[in-house]
Amino acid sequence: MNDTVGRTQTRGAGLFATYDVPSSFCELMNRADLATPGLRCVRDRLAHFDLDELRRRTAAVEAQLYRLGITFTVYTDNQAIDRILPFDVVPRVLTAAEWDHVERGVRQRVQAINLFLWDIYHDRHILRDGIIPSEMVLGNANYCDAMVGLDVPGGVYVHVNGTDLVRDPAGRFLILEDNARTPSGVSYVIENRHMMLRMMPDLASGLDIRPVDEYGLRLHRALAETAPDGVADPQVVLLSPGIYNAAYFEHVFLAREMGIPLVEGRDLVVVEGRVFMRTVAGLSPVHTIYRRLNDDFLDPQVFNPDSLLGVPGLVDAYRRGNVTIANAIGTGVADDKAVYAYMPRIIRYYLDQDPILDNVETHICAEKAGLDYTLANLDQLVVKPVGESGGYGLLIGPHATLAELEDFRARLQADPANYISQPVINLSVSPTLCPAGLEARHVDLRPFAVTGKETWVLPGGLSRVALRKGSLVVNSSQGGGSKDTWVLAS
């Protein structure tokens, strides 16, 4: 979908008078559909705000976020620092047509991912048919032998998926990566909305913005729908690594939103192949576990024997069909950055459809052609390790020094299978409150999809913003912030 044909460079008024409209696609200023009433209304209302007033409201929002404990933890070499995710009071606005396109694309992607995971842990048709190399799947560090032959309820492996999207200079949405293990950030989506409605009611007044408050209800429903067969009133729990985890606030938030117990591994026990929760009244059965810790720590009898975070015997109970784990163990194969390159083929293979949302062009360094191209164009590409997340370990060629390029060249040649490369996408920008006023900053979008009997996509998602001028890295761990994402209902 391209909604930007014929767009013009529009100089704003008021607060936007000094806004330097970039050549990038701007979410609010230089787009052909700015005549959409909601978009025009937001722009015109913002233009009449006083800069000092916006700053005052921003300070009030951030103080409130900190008082509420809405933080994440940044780990340095010798300390852990609790920080709020910097919040920008200028919202990102998506039209109803844009959201319809994104929503259909995300649902299609999630459906294909679940079919792919079922297949690789059962009949492996896609491997035998040569659609994707067998070694890329069966030799993947995230492939879990314990999942082979296990029939997960409803065929749902990925109950919660976070799909990272960017927009190119033409305004097209492109999928940057999939997050099919333990995607985080949805708590900020909901809290950002609460803050915006409280602190910027004059900006939102009268606009038909799709709500985000039903996420907890939708998630609980999906987790209950995929509980083991024959359970009339499933007990769902959220399994957290504990208070020292960087996303612990989100664990508390989601457990409260769903109205379920927040537990740690020591709170659960497996007896005769069934999972129970320790309570003051004795052992109480557990049917679905929404886990927020990685595979390696789930069960010391199967994975890391030194783990104190998991539950001994959990995998045995899972294989017996007595408990559902969400997301399923072994889903990391589907969000591997090398497997990502094959997702268009995976969608066509299982669904006989063209992808609604395209991938970013990707070169697989495990393949000779991909490695040769990457080495020849290293200074023009983004190079990513396939197993990392959070913006760590990547190279942005155009911004790298000669020494950094040569160091990365050596890493590529030593372990090419660990890397993929992509062209540098001139990401879309959004007006963002900066020390000098409103300035363009790059943004991405992470919609969250919840799957039970069907897939529901939270309207909007997490818009992350690179607060450093010119930066393409939006991750919170790398200094990024967030915006409220408004989806217009009509």
Image (tube, rainbow, N blue to C red):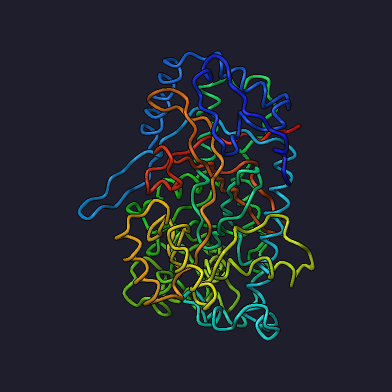
Whether residue 279 can be seen here: no
Residue drawn at 37 percent across, 64 percent down:
266
Using the image as rendered, state which of residue 179 and residue 289 is in the foreground.
Answer: 179
Q: Position of residue 232 (x, y in %)?
A: 68, 61
* Residue extending furthest toward the right: 352
Using the image as rendered, state which of residue 334 and residue 259 is in the foreground.
Answer: 334
Measured along the vertical axis of the image, is residue 144 above or below residue 159?
below
Q: Viewed as shown, does residue 168 lie left or right of 347?
A: left
Measured along the vertical axis of the image, is residue 405 above or below residue 92?
below
Measured along the vertical axis of the image, is residue 228 above or below residue 4?
below
Whether residue 479 can be seen here: yes
| Quarter location, residue 95 | top right
The quadrant of the image that shows the C terminus is top right
Using the image as rendered, state which of residue 145 and residue 380 is in the foreground.
Answer: 380
Residue drawn at 64 percent across, 66 percent down:
343
* Residue extending furthest toward the left: 78
| Quarter location, residue 21 | top right
Residue drawn at 68 percent across, 55 percent down:
357
Q: Position of residue 76 (x, y in %)?
A: 26, 52
Q: Position of residue 439 (x, y in %)?
A: 47, 29
Residue drawn at 49 percent across, 73 percent down:
372
